Image (spheres, coloured by chain):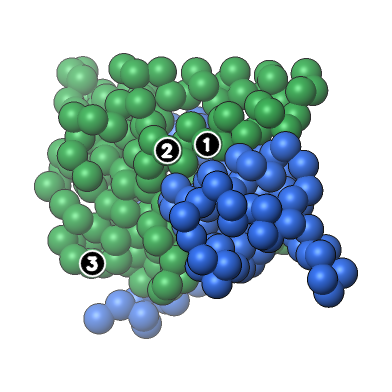
Chain colours: A blue, B green
Amino acid sequence: MPAVGLSTTFAALADPTRRAILARLAGGETSVSELAQPFSLSLPAISKHLKVLERAGLISRGREAQWRPCRLEAQPLKDAAGWIETYRRHWEQGLDRLEAYLQELQRDAPQGAGGKNRVLKKKVTRSQR
Amino acid sequence: MSESNTSDREIVITRVLKAPRELVFEAWTRPEHVAQWWGPTGFTTTTAAMEVRVGGSWRFVMHGPDGTDWPNRVDFLEVVRPERLVYDHGDGIESSPHHFRVVVTFEDAGAGRTLLTMRSVFPTREQRDFVVKEVNAIEGGQQTIGRLEVFLETFQPR
């Protein structure tokens, strides 16, 4: 089940530096300068990564002007892991429905789906070339 | 994305269906048919456009039982009627990367039956590993462990 949020999570996780930052934050709240230390990156470069992570909801930043600690937010990661499981279960259900529908099609006239799709068919016809 | 090195991050689902593969393929590739079965229990699907050909796409919205709408976009990379479909499946947002590539094969299983195999490939191994590791580190609870087991099982090489 693709969700907008998951797309952002996966895009944010695609970068090794960002994954390393998150792994570091798993140990607790950390300031930006502390975060920058182990990486041979400038503060602006680190800030850029942090912005991506923040937009993806993977971290949050403290409000204090001088010391804005970064904190790991677990929910998007949990959603990503849960999504895999959900994906499989959803497809199993979809295939159950396909199985039932194929039986229905073979019982009915060869034209198949019949009148109940009139509205959808109209929509589709209009938007197809 | 080569198929040989993706076994550690793919989800494979198979099903034997009691219908000839021409019909199964059609049920998969026509909007009036997919409206009847696509998606999990309780979901409905509205197709905006469906063009099943190489380079064509299928844009649709899945309506969840709780009223949530999920925009979807499928871009077809291979279409071999009635044997095989390869597509990228994403959320229809232009700037977002595709979530996964799906290969669907329709094999004649004899006696008017079809063996359907769906192979969905998760973006990268690093992303998968990271998700597993961090979820494990953050949540020690029984529920999460149960979920992780399912998650890991999903990625057993086949």
Mark drawn on residue B31: none
Q: Amino acid type of disc 3?
A: Gly
In the image, what residue occupies the spot 47% across and 24% down?
A: B154
Q: Judge whether residue B89 can be spotted in this image.
A: yes
Q: In x, y percent, where is residue A6?
A: 56, 54
Q: Quadrant of the N terminus of chain B?
A: top left
Mark 3 belongs to chain: B
Q: Which residue is mark 1?
A: B130
Q: Nearer the viewer, mark 1 or mark 3?
A: 1
Say whether marks 1 and 2 touch (CB < 8 Å): yes
Image quadrant in which you'd find residue B122:
top left
Q: Amino acid type of disc 2?
A: Glu
Q: In x, y percent, where is residue A127?
A: 36, 80
Mark drawn on residue B56: 3
Q: Is residue B144 left or right of residue A50?
A: right
In the image, what residue occupies the spot 58% across and 29% down?
A: B133
Depth check, front residue: B40 or A4: A4
Q: Is B64 drawn above or below residue B128 in the view shown? A: below
Q: Is B16 drawn above or below residue B132 in the view shown? A: above
Residue sitting farthest toward the left: B80
Q: Is residue A118 left or right of residue B112?
A: right
Question: Mark 2 falls on what kind of element?
Answer: helix
Whole-number angstrom distance, CA of label 1 to CA of label 3: 33 Å
Q: Which residue is mark 2?
A: B126
